Amino acid sequence: MKRKEILGRLIGELTHFILEGNPLRMVISLHQEDDGAHISIFDDKPRPEEELQRIRESLNPKARRPELAEYYGMMAGHDMAWDARLKLIGWQIKHASVGNTDSGVQIDLWLGSDAFNPANFTIDRKA
């Protein structure tokens, strides 16, 4: 699967999840490098810590299978519960962090090749 298709599907799935909360504002930021990408999405709906933790767990599954990203990507767009939708994203990325900001929630996704080095990014390991 081409890089732009993977990014498009991940952004689409994340957008679908955010729109479920009917936000008045949503902002998506994409930063690409040769060997990876960083996607940030913000909305104006703060969430309770329990929900943030469920989102973190869905986006950061214990078993990652990035070699199956194309298969998971083909499942994108199907009608499913939000935690299943987020798990599809989580199986395709290197790391995700989730937290409330002053105005809503922020979700950061990091994608990369096998050479991805998280030390090159500011990643909150507890998120």
Image (spheres, rainbow, N blue to C red):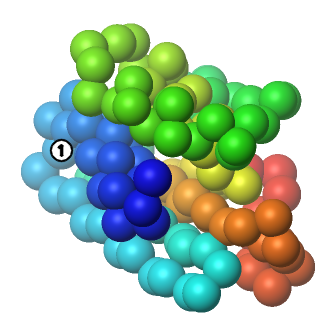
Other-residue count near label 1 (Cα within 10 Å), few / some / many at <14 / 14–19 / ≥20: few
Number of marks drawn:
1
Per the image, the residue denoted by label 1 is: 23
**Whole-percent x and y of residue 125?**
83, 57
Seen as rendered, the residue at the extreme front is 1
- In terms of image quadrants, where is residue 79? top left
Q: Which residue is at a point 44% across and 37% down the rendered structure image? A: 73
Is 65 above or below relative to 34?
A: above
Callout 1 amino acid? Pro
Q: Which residue is at a point 77% across and 37% down the rendered structure image? A: 64
Q: Is residue 18 left or right of residue 41?
A: left
Q: Is residue 116 left or right of residue 67?
A: right
- In terms of image quadrants, where is residue 67? top right
In this rendered view, identify the residue nearer to me: 23 or 56: 56
Please say whether residue 75 is visible from this viewpoint: yes
Q: Which residue is at a point 27% across and 28% down the rendered structure image? A: 77
**Whole-percent x and y of residue 122?**
75, 78
**Whole-percent x and y of residue 4?**
36, 66
Q: Is residue 35 left or right of residue 39?
A: right
In this rendered view, identify the residue nearer to me: 119 or 27: 119
Please say whether residue 49 is visible from this viewpoint: no
Q: Which residue is at a point 18% across and 44% down the rendered structure image? A: 23
Query: SS of the residue at dot 1?
Result: loop
**Whole-percent x and y of residue 93?**
64, 51
- In terms of image quadrants, where is residue 49? top right
Q: Is residue 63 left or right of residue 19?
A: right
In this rendered view, identify the residue nearer to me: 52 or 108: 108
Is 96 above or below relative to 71?
A: below
